[in-house]
Amino acid sequence: MTPGAASADTARAYTHHATLTQLDPAGLTELGETIDRLGSTYSTKPPSELWPTAARHRHHVFTLQHGRRHTLSEARELAHHAGMLSVILAWIAHDLGENDLVHAYCDDAWTQSEQAGHPEVGAWAEDVRSTHALYANRPLDALLAATRGMAVAPRKGNAAVRLSAQIARAHARLGQADDFEHAAVRAHNYQQQLPLHGAGLFAVDAVRITSYDASSYVWLGHADRARAAAEEAIGHYRSFPAPFRAPTRLAIAQLDLALAHSALGEPDASIATAREALDSSRLVDSIRGRAQQLDRTLRCHYPQDPAVAEFGEELHVRLAA
């Protein structure tokens, strides 16, 4: 065929078909707003209440991906929305203690990230996976996940900041003090440029890194430094205005402080602080696990203390409720 024999209408048909879609642009915008809203209000609602909403939206995106005609650019946008919703579902599964669901939704988010060409979605998935592994006492898996996420996270983006702190505390959980100190330098360099507090599931703030330091010093056996970092974090969390409150992170900082008190020979202060943590408005699986760790530590260090035995019984009743 020569150019003269070709029809301009054929070329126009190619162009037309490339733009054919059954999707409503307003609907795609609304999906993005829904994801932002789920992330920004995450800490204010119990995970069991969040799950049905996030799961419904994730399935809706699936139906759009596979049941409606759309353009290539819309396919990437849908994959991005799908990945972010799967990250949110992975966080909810973590809060509920659903191990298989955490990994399934992290895997989906990573795949959707590749399809969308948005590597930060995959980095956020590895942030969840790293956190979940740490609380499941699998620190090597936590380090691997954080390192994998850091490899794809956009430089200086929120996910990269979070993952830098994840790498540091994973080294601490492994007892690798030198590696922790080296990784912590990077996290603290980020910290100097961060706002004191930030709202939402995908925010970064200076207090989070201080809180991660508290956990790290507990694991490394530096009780004085753990106490100082935990007290600093708790003071900031308590002063946060309503939109920035983070009840789960506050409770974890309180339990880190309780573990520091235990290590410093202060069982009464440890128990009192732990009770404050257990009064959290958002008693998720990570708080339960850290409280159980504290109970084991107290019983090991103070086996004859009646207050320790009483706290253990109280905790058993509370967590069984």
Image: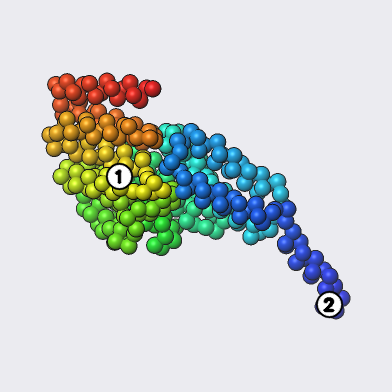
Label 1 residue SS: helix
Q: Residue furthest bottom?
A: 4
Q: Quadrant of residue 135?
A: top left
Q: Residue 301: horizontal and vertical position, in percent?
A: 16, 29
What's the amino acid at mark 1?
Arg
Could you tell which of marks 1 and 2 lies nearer the N-terminus? 2
Q: Residue furthest right?
A: 5
How busy is the neighbourhood of tag 2: few (under 14 within 10 Å), some, or many (20 plus)? few
Seen at 37% across and 56% down, the residue is 161
Seen at 36% across and 49% down, the residue is 241
Seen at 76% across and 61% down, the residue is 17
Label 2 residue SS: loop
Residue hosting label 2: 2
Q: Quadrant of residue 98?
A: top left
Residue hosting label 1: 238
Of tags 1 and 2, the one toward the viewer is 1
What's the amino acid at mark 2?
Thr
Q: Residue 48: horizontal and vertical position, in percent?
A: 48, 33
